[in-house]
Image (tube, helix red, strand yellow):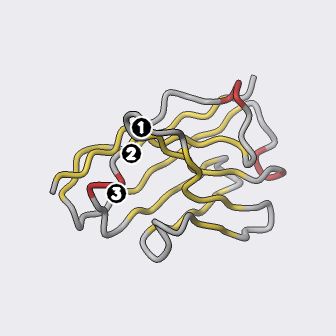
Amino acid sequence: QVQFVESGGGLVQAGGSLRLSCAASGTTFSANAIGWYRQAPEKQRELVASISVSGITNYADSVKGRFTISRDNAKKTLYLQMNTLKPEDAAVYYCNYYPSYRQYWGQGTQVTVSS
């Protein structure tokens, strides 16, 4: 059973930083591209960043230069370092395969950014 468990969210002031983690289980983690996604209230879920099997990264334009995605295959863990946070970054953040699979969405972790 594939499972992704996100953590590390919280309340931060604008300009601050957070590091999100996503622990994977039941999957051959190293053999798959993985992504961070987010969903703000009344908005569709969107891809924030992805990382390929070989470590190639891609970012949404809105987070380029501020967010960094990384993976530790030995720990089966995905990370998202978020710097210079803005109020518009507030959302529930999820990890999933890239492209995503509907059945593998977890609970996500809430990020709140105060202005």
At horizontal 64% and vertical 57% (from top left) the residue drawn is 72
Q: What element carries label 3?
A: strand
Q: Which amino acid is tagged 1?
A: Thr
Image coordinates for residue 65, horizontal then vertical, percent: 46, 77
Q: Which amino acid is tagged 2?
A: Gly
The residue labelled by disc 2 is 8
Q: Quadrant of the image for the N terminus?
A: top right
Residue 8 position (above or below residue 61): above
Image coordinates for residue 22, horizontal then vertical, percent: 55, 44
Q: What element carries label 1?
A: strand
Q: First in sequence: mark 1 or mark 2?
A: 2
The residue labelled by disc 3 is 18
Q: Distance between the residues labelled 3 and 1?
A: 11 Å
Q: Do the residues labelled 1 and 2 touch (CB within 8 Å)?
A: yes
Q: Which amino acid is tagged 3?
A: Leu
Q: Are marks 3 and 2 in contact (CB under 8 Å)?
A: yes
